[in-house]
Image: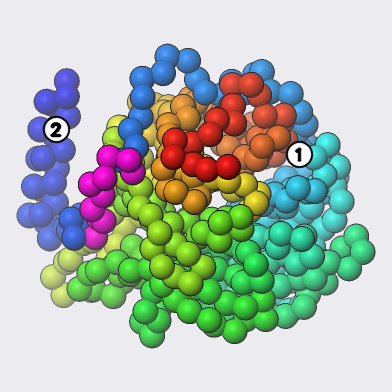
Amino acid sequence: MLLLILAASLAYCQSDRKEGVTLHPTEENIPVVTDPRFILHEQEVATPWLEFTDLQGYTIGVNEGARNDMIGMVTDLAVTPEALYYTDAEYFEVRVYDFSGNLKTIIGGTKGVGPGEFWFPARVAVTEDGERLIVGDGGNSVEVFRRQGSTYTLEHSFRAAGLFLSGDICVMHGHIYTTGYADELDGIIHKYTLDGKHVASFGTPYMATERIVREKMSSQASLGCNGTHRIIGHTNWSIPVFTGYSDTGEEIWRVKFADVVLAPVRERHRSGQGPTVGNLSASIGEASNIRITAGIPSSAAFTVTYRIRGENNSGRHHFFRVDAKTGQGEYLGWYPNWHEDVSQPSVFALDTERVYTVSNKPYPQIGIYRRPDSLPQRPTPGSHP
């Protein structure tokens, strides 16, 4: 069976080349990792790492009811020690909940580009003290809100490099970090002050002849800030490598996920037309993206996940833990993603106490659950207290 799959894949790739198609990422864009301490493998584990039927906690969102009781389109989720925040692109707002699922605050609610309005709230981050809320809105607008009592008011906004529809945002120690490609900036991770002043850019942009490819492949990224060790974690959706940078842009460590096969991005060239770049679309056995699971910035480690597609849209979500200081990690396990008609929730965030999930069927919901014993807080090999 494996030989048949390989033969079919080879024939498909050869067919692509005949039609003027280049598959990305190309070899020169995949960073090399040779130290076995930083090469992580999936392991054969018979039982799921997470059983959703056993989780105890609360769910947010109803099928029918008042607007504030329903969930629209969840685009991002952030947690602090006190609250959960999520961006809703259907209702054009950011909502804040406590850990019992009680709604505390709504920011926005009107579509637009004026003060307090959102065009497409795509990303959210919160400072360690909870005093400022940062929203990546629309294409590349960053809006900074200050907490005043029980709500947040707009402090200012600025334009960042890249697009938040595929990029990411995080915040730590008084600085905002975003991802995105820009010709004039030498990097794909961009550091700003809270008032929007550009400080630095770092990380290697994707190398390609066509600008559209450089922008597409550089922009599709996941970002995480670890305030304890001042490390910015970065993954590209299409490259099986997780990189940790210092807050000054120095590469600290590099981790490779050795077993994942990522869906290729196709760059097509047709006679008389400019190049086009496709979207990620995983086939059976491939992963559609690698992302950093949100967590509290003061935690000791990052959690990184990818989903392998199975038959009939089933599959498995695989999880790894990577120590923020050392870059050494371990495989945590997997949980199933069944057919879309009975799909499991997706884990959007983890902390030492809870698991936070998002599901869209049979209607949108957010789950806040007690972290079960099946998700132990084990020390990572090579980590230090």
111 vs 309, nearest the viewer: 309
Badge 1 local density, few (<14 within 10 Å), some, or many (20+)? some
Residue found 33% across the figure and 68% down from its top: 204
At x 13%, y 46%, the residue is 13
Question: Disc 2 marks which residue?
Answer: 6
In this rendering, the answer to whether 149 lies above or below 155 is above
In the rendered image, which quarter is residue 278 located in?
bottom left
Where residue 254 appears, as percent x and y from the top left, is 35, 53
List the residue tagged with mark 1. Answer: 61
Residue at x 53% of width, y 81% of height: 199
Span of residues in magenta = 29-38
Residue found at x 59% / y 21%? 374
Q: Secondary structure at mark 2?
A: helix
Q: How is the image coloured?
A: rainbow
Magenta run includes residue 33? yes
Residue 85's x, y, as percent? 73, 52
Residue that sits furthest to the top in the current view: 46
Question: In what quadrant of the picture does the N terminus appear?
Answer: top left
- The CA span between labels 1 and 2 is 44 Å
**Image check: 201 left or right of 27?**
right
Mark 1 vs 2, N-terminal side: 2
Q: Position of residue 287 (x, y in %)?
A: 36, 40
Instruction: Please check the rendered image and state whether residue 328 is part of the magenta-colored stretch, yes or no.
Output: no
